[in-house]
Image: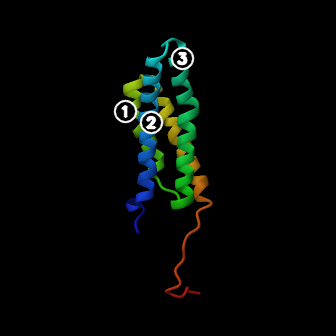
Amino acid sequence: MQRWKRRGTWARLGALFACYLLLPAFATTAIGLVNPSDLGMMAFILLLFIAFPLITVALAAWDGIWEGFTVLWTFLPLLFFIAPMLIFYNESALIYGVAYSLLAVTANKIGSLFYSKSYTTNSPRES
């Protein structure tokens, strides 16, 4: 099966996009319910520096372990971060999308080192 047609990779990338959109939305809603002082800025900074990198690394490494290395993790985290950047942040946060892509491709490559290829016994190996 071709690498582009595997549903596991696309499911993990979809989960990454959902996290990029839903976590800031939940933070905005929660901060709107309480006192919107410096708590809002602290929540968004925690998302940018802790939550998003951890989620990105975890999903990319998981995909590398189960599916092997793919180039999708080089540009899709940056592409997925553009929508929340324009909605919740400003253009200066684009550098974080680049950093998430670098983290993702590194984690996917490290995870692919633990990927075990399945071999079939239907045909003999060539010697």
Counting from the top left corner in percent of width and height, residue 26 is at: 44, 29
Disc 3 residue crowd, few under 14, some 14–19, many 20+, Cα 10 Å: few
Distance, label 3 to label 2, CA atoms, is 19 Å
Q: Earlier in the sequence, mark 1 or mark 3?
A: 3
**Amino acid at circle 3:** Leu
Q: Residue tagged by mark 1? A: 83
Q: Residue tagged by mark 2? A: 20
The residue at 59%/87% (across/down) is 127
**Amino acid at circle 1:** Ala
Against 53, is 58 above or below? below
Image side of residue 66 versus residue 28, left or right: right
Which numbered mark, 3 or 2, is in the foreground of this view? 3
Which numbered mark, 2 or 1, is in the foreground of this view? 2
Q: Secondary structure at mark 2?
A: helix
Q: Nearer the viewer, residue 84 or 2?
A: 84
Counting from the top left corner in percent of width and height, residue 27 is at: 47, 26
